[in-house]
Amino acid sequence: MESTSIGTRIKQRRKELGLTQVQIKQETGISSGNMSEIENGNKLPSTPALISLSAILDCSIDWMLKGETPKRENTFLSEERESKLLEGFRELSERDKEELIEILEMKLRKTQRERGTYVKSSELTDTKRSNMVG
């Protein structure tokens, strides 16, 4: 495990969220000195520190350690279930469709934060925002 990249990811995420090392200390109890050592790659975070950092940085421990989020098994939909989902979506009112798209975008942003990736919401829907792309 390379401590430099772990520290780099933690520092990057902290800065993305606009958090200071002092705020991390206030929320987690990890001293600014320890955070500096972790972020500079001189020290690996302990298990309790990883758990605390995961919560405050809103990211997975896997992402902090490896730079990736584990692939979830069995997350695919069968063709039948996917078809049922799409048919159900088409039966909804435009207002309900819009609400579901907003929920989807929110969930995708959360997943992307955990993975350290970002996709603009405009890439998910067309300009009318009533039809899913793909």
Image (tube, rainbow, N blue to C red):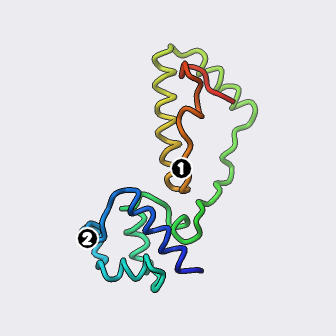
Left/right placement of residue 127 relative to residue 55 reads right
Asked where in the image residue 21 lies, by quadrant, the reply is: bottom left
Q: Secondary structure at mark 2?
A: helix
Q: Residue at x 45, y 64 (%)?
A: 12
Question: As rendered, which of 10 and 73 lies closer to the eye?
Answer: 10
83 vs 104, nearest the viewer = 104
What residue would you read off at disc 1? 112
Q: Residue at x 60, y 62 (%)?
A: 68
Q: Using the rendered view, name the quadrant where residue 11 is placed.
A: bottom left
Q: Nearer the viewer, residue 69 or 125?
A: 125
Q: Secondary structure at mark 1?
A: helix
Question: Tag count in the figure?
Answer: 2
Depicted 42 relative to depicted 131: above or below:
below
Residue 60 against residue 87 in the figure, above or below: below
Q: Quadrant of the N terminus?
A: bottom right
**Callout 2 crowding tier (Cα within 10 Å): few <14, some 14–19, many ≥20:** some
Which amino acid type is shown beneath numbered disc 1?
Gln
Q: Which mark is residue 96?
A: none
Which of the two discs, 2 and 1, sits closer to the camera?
2
